Image (cartoon, rainbow, N blue to C red):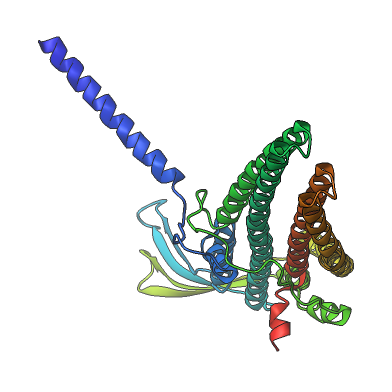
């Protein structure tokens, strides 16, 4: 009985520990944010990501950390208290107490504050770049969901068309107008359409997960993405791109980094000028009546160490920052123009499919279907026209998603172009 009771207690503790660890694991794996089960708009998706993305939250923490650097840089050196007692003999015992106040020279305090402030601006520029990259990722993922939704709808239409073709083929076989082989081909085509539908459903689920993961949710809660995948943004001009490049976060970051390096050079130059410490105090001695006032001045002599090594390092890092700024300007300009060309090319692809390929594929399919029902075309021609139409629709939707993705990539470099379009 005693052994059984102890065993029960042990199992109870083990079960309680397992339940506790399970709850902790569930809490650790819980999403940071769960959106409402309703249609999701693009502006909502961007807001969710900006507010709840873990990577962006870490960038904000970095900005907050630089506030400590600014505070520390504004602090003056602490005063010193010195107490000394001599006890060689009772007759000659004496004691001194002094307070030393260090004084910084050559504008070291101002240089530290400026360097710390510029460090904060560098962190803010990094945060701005992170926000643009996140916004670009949200836009691309959102329109991927929209395109996946349309591809699924297209696949469902394909299944319905295949079912219709199968029904027509079955009726014509029953009427003895075509061979049973044609019906078999129709059923094979219908099965292929169903496979395509399954693949489109899987891709839709994956695209929804990719979008929701941008605000830390691995299980999407929204019902669908609400928007028009065919509503393409306006194509910016090269002049607009050039104007926006001047205020691009990457360029601003490189500029602030160069300014920070210059301020650090000024700080190291100031540190080559020695500071001094003024001390005041009193001395008490047993062999002398009363107390004696003490005043001391402490000045290091810059004979060997004049901070020349740190100054040389700061100068070389300033040169490096200047080279990085020039490289950023060149790379950013070239990348932005390439992104603009990519947007233009993707738009041309989408326009070609919309204006020429889709209408032709649709009219061909309709003509083939009517002709097959009237006995003018073979079923193979209907199947071929059907496959061409579905492929054209899929290519068009993929082309639309590519346009939005290319536009998002461009905006990740230079910012939201919708603000210019609204002006």
Q: x, y (%) of residue 189?
A: 73, 39
- Nearest to the observer: residue 102 or residue 361: 361
- Nearest to the observer: residue 219 or residue 255: 219
Residue at position x 67%, y 62% in the image: 143
Q: Quarter of the image for the C terminus: give it.
A: bottom right
Q: Confirm whether residue 405 shows in the render.
A: yes
Residue furthest front in the image = 175
Seen in the picture, residue 3 relative to 310 is either above or below; the reply is: above
Q: x, y (%) of residue 181?
A: 77, 31
In terms of image quadrants, where is residue 170?
A: top right
Residue at position x 70%, y 45% in the image: 168
Residue 300 is left or right of residue 313, and the answer is left
Q: x, y (%) of residue 363?
A: 82, 61
Residue 217 is left or right of residue 188, and the answer is left
- Nearest to the observer: residue 235 or residue 93: 235
Residue furthest bottom in the image = 423
Residue 2 is left or right of residue 183, and the answer is left
Seen in the picture, residue 57 relative to 116 is either above or below; the reply is: above
Q: x, y (%) of residue 6?
A: 17, 16
Residue at position x 80%, y 78% in the image: 246
Q: Confirm whether residue 327 shows in the render.
A: no
Q: Quarter of the image for the N terminus: give it.
A: top left
- Nearest to the observer: residue 38 or residue 333: 38
């Amino acid at each position: 009985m005693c052994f059984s009771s102890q065993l029960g207690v042990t199992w109870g503790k083990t079960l309680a520990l397992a339940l506790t660890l399970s709850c902790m694991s569930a809490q650790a794996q819980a999403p940071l944010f769960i959106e409402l089960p309703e249609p999701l708009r693009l502006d909502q998706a961007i807001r969710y990501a900006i507010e709840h993305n873990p990577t962006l939250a870490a960038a904000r923490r970095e900005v907050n950390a630089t506030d400590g650097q600014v505070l520390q840089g504004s602090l003056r050196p602490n005063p010193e208290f010195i107490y000394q007692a001599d006890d060689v003999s009772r007759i000659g015992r004496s004691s001194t107490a002094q307070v030393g106040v260090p004084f910084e020279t050559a504008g070291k305090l101002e240089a530290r504050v400026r360097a710390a402030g510029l460090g904060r601006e560098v962190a803010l520029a990094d945060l701005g770049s992170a926000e643009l990259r996140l916004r670009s990722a949200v836009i691309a993922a959102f329109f991927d969901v929209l395109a996946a939704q349309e591809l699924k709808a297209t696949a469902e239409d394909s299944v319905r068309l295949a079912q219709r073709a199968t029904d027509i083929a079955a009726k014509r076989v029953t009427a003895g107008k075509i061979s049973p082989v044609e019906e078999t081909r129709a059923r094979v085509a219908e099965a292929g359409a169903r496979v395509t539908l399954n693949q489109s459903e899987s891709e839709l689920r994956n695209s929804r997960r990719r979008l929701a993961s941008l605000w830390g949710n691995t299980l999407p809660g929204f019902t669908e993405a609400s928007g028009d995948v065919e509503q393409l943004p306006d194509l910016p001009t090269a002049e607009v791109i050039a104007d926006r490049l001047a205020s691009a976060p990457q360029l601003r970051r490189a500029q602030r980094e160069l300014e920070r390096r210059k301020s650090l050079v000024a700080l190291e130059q100031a540190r080559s000028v020695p500071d001094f410490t003024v001390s005041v105090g009193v001395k008490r001695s047993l062999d002398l009546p009363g107390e004696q006032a003490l005043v001391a001045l402490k000045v290091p002599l810059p004979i060997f160490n004049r901070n020349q090594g740190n100054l040389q390092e700061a100068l070389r890092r300033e040169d490096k920052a200047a080279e990085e700024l020039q490289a950023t300007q060149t790379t950013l300009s070239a990348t932005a123009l390439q992104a603009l060309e990519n947007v233009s090319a993707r738009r041309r692809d989408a326009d070609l499919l919309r204006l020429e390929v889709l209408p032709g594929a649709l009219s061909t399919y309709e003509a083939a279907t009517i002709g097959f029902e009237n006995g003018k075309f073979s079923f193979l021609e209907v199947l071929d026209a059907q496959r061409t139409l579905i492929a054209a629709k899929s290519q068009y939707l993929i082309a639309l998603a590519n346009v939005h993705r290319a536009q998002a990539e461009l905006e990740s470099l230079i910012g939201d172009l919708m603000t210019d379009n609204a002006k």
